Amino acid sequence: MNGIHDLGGMHGFGPVVREENEPVFHAEWERRTFGVVNLAMGAMQIHVDEIRHAIERMPPAEYLESPYYEHWIYGLEALLRERGVITRDELARRVAELAKQEKK
Amino acid sequence: MPALPKDMVWTVVKTGMSARAEVKTPPRFKTGDRVVARNVNPAGHTRLPRYIRGKTGVVHRYHGSFAFADTRAHGQGDQPQHVYSVRFEARELWGDAASAHDALYIDLWDTYIEQAK
């Protein structure tokens, strides 16, 4: 698919910034995402190519503005919906619940 | 829903779940062959980047055969193919302003490439 992920040769993104002593994860949610996605891929027998393609189908503007592990979350959510594990509404409800808990 | 059996988990974690798979036919290309990346625009998953389509390169080495990402991404099975590392000169990809000393090596499945004329 000629998607936004296929960036080779494009201009305008600025230099590649290298981080000194870059940690494996920049935040706890990234560590959890890594675990949850790997677990789900094993449990649901999702090929790496399937989740890659799910990520490629992200809306292009969203893809460019979000960090790496958000792409993983998007990919997994898309596959969970497509395989009928969760619905868009169920996910939205749960996100709203968690947001409410966080405010308290 | 099929799941990874418990007794396979350690093997998968340890080996990183290799995509290596057997192909019965011999590889079509050998080191030194000039090949052209096909100009195709599949709507599904592919690992053939846009910037090499229609460009000519040279087979650098043969890697073996591997499950095909383009079919696996869509639940169409492994359908393994031979994979080659192909060298593309920077000038072939980006034009005369690119460095004459730079080149790109990219791993390509058999059906991504054709013999150059």
Image (spheres, coloured by chain):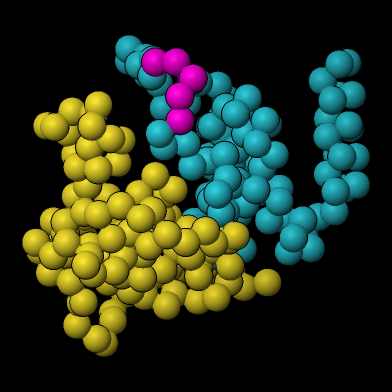
Chain colours: A cyan, B yellow
What are the residue bounds of the magenta stretch? A10-15
Q: Is residue A99 left or right of residue B102?
A: right
Check the image and name the residue furthest to the left: B32
Q: Is residue B25 visible?
A: yes
Check the image and name the residue furthest to the bottom: B24
Task: Residue at 42%, 78% (x, y): give it.
Answer: B79
Tally of numbered tags:
0
Quarter where residue B75 is shown: bottom right
Quarter where residue B100 is shown: top left
Q: Is residue B3 left or right of residue A18?
A: right
Task: Residue at 47%, 61% (x, y): give it.
Answer: B40
**Residue A50 position (above or below residue A89):** below
Task: Residue at 35%, 49% (x, y): give it.
Answer: B52
Q: Position of residue B49 (x, y in %)?
A: 42, 49
Q: Nearer the viewer, residue B11 or A51?
A: A51
Task: Residue at 62%, 51% (x, y): give it.
Answer: A54
Check the image and name the residue furthest to the top: A20
Q: Nearer the viewer, residue A53 or B116?
A: B116
Q: Position of residue A23 (x, y in %)?
A: 40, 21
Q: Nearer the viewer, residue B50 or A85?
A: B50
Magenta segment, principal secondary structure?
Answer: loop
